[in-house]
Amino acid sequence: MIKKGLTVYSGIIISFIVLIVILGSIRFLDAEIAVRVMHFLQSLHTLHQATEDIPDLLVYLVIFGTTIMWIIYFYRSHENKHDITMKFLKLAATALPIAYLMKSFFQFMFGRTPTRVFVQAHQPLIFNWFHGIGFGCFPSGHMTVFTAFGIAIWIYYPQYRRPVFITLLLLGAALIATDYHFLSDVIAGAYLGILITYFLLYAFKRLEEKPNHFS
């Protein structure tokens, strides 16, 4: 009971700190960083062209990754294999589509001006709540989905924690450096991905702890 209370309390404190960081980024850093990045990209014509129209393949990656992991999971389940790999596959294959749906909902809800619309079309940087589809970038979808997947690896394969951390750090930097997201979008997406995976982990553990009344 004490440990659970401490965990909840720690989670509240961490969430509050992350919220303050996000709000601080929105207020003081996002616009300045985005404008400076675009000036840099425009000074290098080749780089600017290369980052101008990068296709968004996230939904296809989510569908493909989720399908492959569930296929492997059910195949191994048929073989009566119950190990760390099975737990990882179940967690990751559930986290991916949920992370994608959650990021889509929050992007629609917040309706934030996308980075390039702000810096190139000179549109105001606002949160237009529950605006139409196609308008909004908060939180970063790529950061949400890849962090949710990365945390599943982090939990079940601790030997890969350093590569996971570095990969997510580079992804966040790339999203900012190509002016596809503000700093706060990336931070919010990363934290949302972490929350999703840990919530699912908690839910699965609770289900496993429940007695089977049909046995």
Image (cartoon, rainbow, N blue to C red):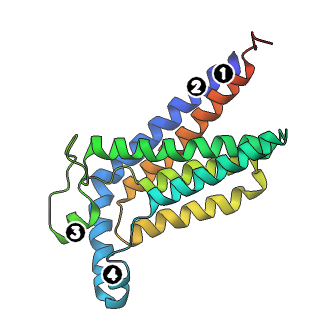
Q: Secondary structure at mark 1?
A: helix
Q: Please say if the residues under marks 1 and 2 sit with CB atoms less than 8 Å apart.
A: yes
Pointer 2 residue: 8
Image quadrant in which the C terminus is located: top right
Q: Is residue 108 above or below residue 200?
A: below
Could you say where residue 21 lies in the image, as x and y percent from the top left? 41, 47
Mark 3 or 2: the one toward you: 3
Q: Give the residue type that dot 1 points to.
A: Lys
Mark 4 or 2: the one toward you: 4
Pointer 4 residue: 41
Gap in Å between the C-alphas at discs 3 and 1?
46 Å
Q: Secondary structure at mark 4?
A: helix
Q: Secondary structure at mark 2?
A: helix
Crowding around mark 1 (Cα neighbors within 10 Å: few <14, some 14 to 19, many 20+) is: few
Crowding around mark 3 (Cα neighbors within 10 Å: few <14, some 14 to 19, many 20+) is: many
Q: Residue at x 61, y 45 (%)?
A: 93
Q: Give the residue type that dot 4 points to.
A: Leu
First-in-chain label (4 vs 2): 2
First-in-chain label (3 vs 2): 2
Pointer 1 residue: 4
Pointer 3 residue: 119
Q: Please say if the residues under marks 4 and 2 sit with CB atoms less than 8 Å apart.
A: no
